Amino acid sequence: MTRSKSKPDDPSERGGYPVAGRHSAVKPCLWLNRSIRGEGSCYKSQFYGIQSHRCIQMTPTLSCNHRCLHCWRQIEHAVPLPAPAEWDSPVEIKGSIIAKHLRLISGYGGSDTTDPDALKEAKQPNQVAISLAGEPTLYPYLPELIDEFKRDGMTTFVVTNGTQPDMVARISPTQLYISLNAPDEDTYLRVCNPIGNFWQQIQESLEILEGARSRMRTAVRITLIKGLNIFDPEGYARLLQTCEPDHIEVKAYMHLGFSRKRLSRDAMPDHDEVLSFASEIADEIGYKIADDAPVSRVVLLSRDGQAKRVR
């Protein structure tokens, strides 16, 4: 007898993500799997000192107001936002996320390839990547959720599409990323396929980022897609100059997950192409290449050519 696959409305799994609480989700990433087996770490380990096997990848909501072509998530199945009275509290989310994460990694204890010391450390996570799926700034209590993780001594990385500038102004994670995947409005509408037009809000969020460096580290992430947005480094530079982030990550689109139904494998730039375009942006804005990770096809830029490590 074969087991049927989980459906989108399965209460324990939604869109392939293990659900925690009523609307959050958590999923150990590929790099946690490799790190716990002693087979390498995420580029965030190389750039920022994050221990991949001690990192929780989660989201407080699977809802999103973008339908980005390059997203590896199952964006074709929209997840509605809960009613205001149905949001889990930050305390509930933290508890359910950590409990579910520990259950998910417990299976590594039965594998001969697991590094027992790494598994012991993994059971004491110290970093939360609020970036699994959905748009985290749609969760109305995100500042309080970040504070809850901080109270446990955990660092937090938040990745946002920048469409909610009011929330961007309120949060203070360890590092805040804004995704910037277009140098102009027309390209934004084509690449990010938003539910509405948030181009103005994204520019407002970038401006807010400029004043946020005093309370947290700031970053802008650019995902490059061949034939769609690898052009006009001057346009990217103009937008980046409004916020002057601590870090700029320029990375390749990767032909993974559900994005394979929207884009061809040829849409992936190779590392040399990413490095070349990142250099053009750096020259325009006066930044330097701080590091790069060829296996992940990502280049790190900073003003002084140095990466700011968390650990």
Image (tube, rainbow, N blue to C red):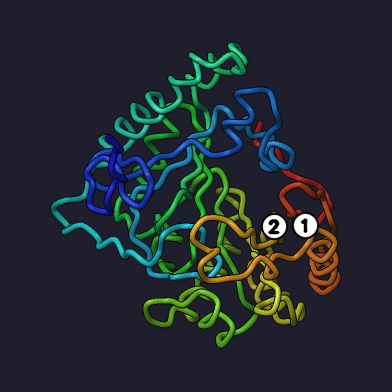
Residue type pointed to by label 1: Leu
**Could you say which is closer to the camera, residue 208 or residue 3?**
3
Q: Where is residue 250 in the image (x, y as percent from the top left)?
A: 71, 61
- Residue position for label 2: 249
Mark identifier at residue 157: none
Identified at 73% across, 54% down, the residue is: 298
User: CA gap, disc 2 to disc 1?
Assistant: 6 Å
Instruction: Specify which label sits upstream in the sequence, 2 or 1.
Output: 2
Q: Is residue 173 above or below residue 210?
A: above
148 sits to left or right of 304: left
Q: Is residue 180 above or below residue 127?
A: below
Q: In this view, does 21 lie above or below 171?
A: above
Residue type pointed to by label 2: Glu
Q: Position of residue 7 (x, y in %)?
A: 27, 51
Label 2 close to label 1 by CB (< 8 Å): yes
17 sits to left or right of 204: left
Identified at 43% across, 43% down, the residue is: 58
Does dot 2 land on a helix, a strand or a loop? Answer: strand
Q: How many residues crowd mark 1 within 10 Å: few (<14), some (14–19), many (20+)?
A: many
Q: How many residues crowd mark 2 within 10 Å: few (<14), some (14–19), many (20+)?
A: many
Q: Where is residue 86 in the image (x, y as percent from the top left)?
A: 16, 51
**Could you say which is closer to the camera, residue 87 or residue 201?**
87
Q: Position of residue 229 (x, y in %)?
A: 67, 77
179 sits to left or right of 241: left
Identified at 48% across, 66% down, the residue is: 162
User: Which quadrant would the N terminus be assigned to in this image?
Assistant: top left
Does dot 1 land on a helix, a strand or a loop? Answer: strand
Identified at 60% across, 51% down, the residue is: 214
- Residue position for label 1: 301
**On the image, which quarter does residue 31 sit in?**
top right
